[in-house]
Amino acid sequence: MSRTRQNTLSKSLKRSPSPPNAPARQGGDDGTRRRLIDAAIRLFDRYGVEGASLRQVIAEAGQSNQSVIQYYFGGKDGLVAAALDEVVEQFRVVQATMEAELAAAGPQPGLRAVIGAYLRPLIQAHTQSDTLQHSVGFLGRVSQSASDYYGLVASRFSPYHAALLERLTATLPDYPRTVVSERLRYAVGTILHSLATAREQLRAPALIVTASAGSTRSSISSPVASADTPRPPVTGNRWRRVRNRRCNSTPPETLPPCS
């Protein structure tokens, strides 16, 4: 990705507008609403959705009215939904860069080109933008949270999943679509979790892209076994059980990563 495109992406993320489909409010001002959303994303990244209290969000946003979240969002669930809408807007900027990279790869890009075109802009933006780092951490946290919150993530990012799935299945015509979709879901979850838990190691984006692209390519294009059938998303307590089993096993299993 060219330096000009990297700078444009970084600047776009910093001035990302408020999401057009955010929950409606009665009165108030957009600045307060935006500060609450930004504070929520930072605290949800730091403590998790269940771990961050509304009182903490209000204080982080510099507000004193303890009813301000109820006024703007109707409660914590509305705040989480609004925060996800803001993250979607940030990823929409990254998505535009991804599509530009794919267009430059030619009319029929291979698996390596598709994965690289999607990973490079995401990881580059992540290393350059504190805002996106918090957003990726928030996504990682909320994806491991209660199933209702996972459903909010899935519904908002389903267009991105569908677009990438189309690209991948075109490069893997002999693989069942359900298998590619399931492998893609786990690969994306692993990448988000890795980015969220290894920020101090993200000083060499090119190396991270190479390593992530290689592991993603291997996990998606590995031979299909007879038992390779779709599984439900690993979330909430089930995620923690699988993680603990993986971390305590020898040799360790592959998903999800330990934290």
Image: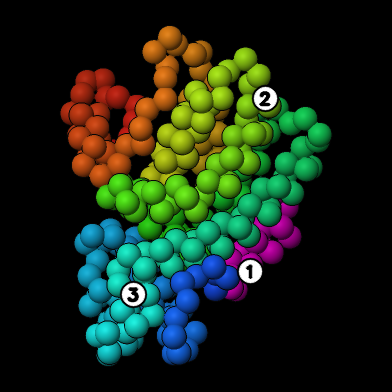
- Indicate which disc residue 148 carries: none
Q: Which residue is mark 2?
A: 171
**Which amino acid type corresponds to the residue marked 2 in the rendered image?**
Thr
Where's residue 246, x and y in %? 25, 29
Earlier residue among tags 1 and 2? 1
Earlier residue among tags 3 and 2? 3
**Which amino acid type corresponds to the residue marked 3 in the rendered image?**
Gly
- Indicate which disc residue 74 carries: 3
Observer-side mark, 1 or 3, equals 3
Residues rendered magenta in the picture? 1-17
Assess whether residue 191 is covered by the magenta stretch: no
**Which amino acid type corresponds to the residue marked 1 in the rendered image?**
Lys
Assess whether residue 8 is covered by the magenta stretch: yes
Observer-side mark, 1 or 2, equals 2
Say if 171 sits above or below 184 in the image: above
Under circle 2, the secondary element is helix
The residue lying at 73 percent from left, 52 percent from top is: 2
Q: Quadrant of residue 92?
A: bottom right
Main secondary-structure element of the magenta-colored stretch? helix
Q: Quadrant of residue 52?
A: bottom left
Where's residue 177, x and y in %? 56, 25
Q: Nearer the viewer, residue 67 or 47?
A: 67
Decide: few, some or many residues near mark 2? Use Cα within 10 Å; few <14, some 14-19, many ≥20.
some
Q: Looking at the image, do the residues carrying marks 1 and 3 touch, with CB atoms under 8 Å apart?
A: no
Say if 86 sits above or below 231 in the image: below
Instruction: For residue 97, say whether it is visible.
Output: yes
The residue lying at 33 percent from left, 75 percent from top is: 74
Q: Nearer the viewer, residue 206 or 51?
A: 51
Decide: few, some or many residues near mark 3? Use Cα within 10 Å; few <14, some 14-19, many ≥20.
some
Cα distance, mark 1 to mark 2?
33 Å
Where's residue 120, x and y in %? 61, 45
Q: Which residue is mark 1?
A: 11
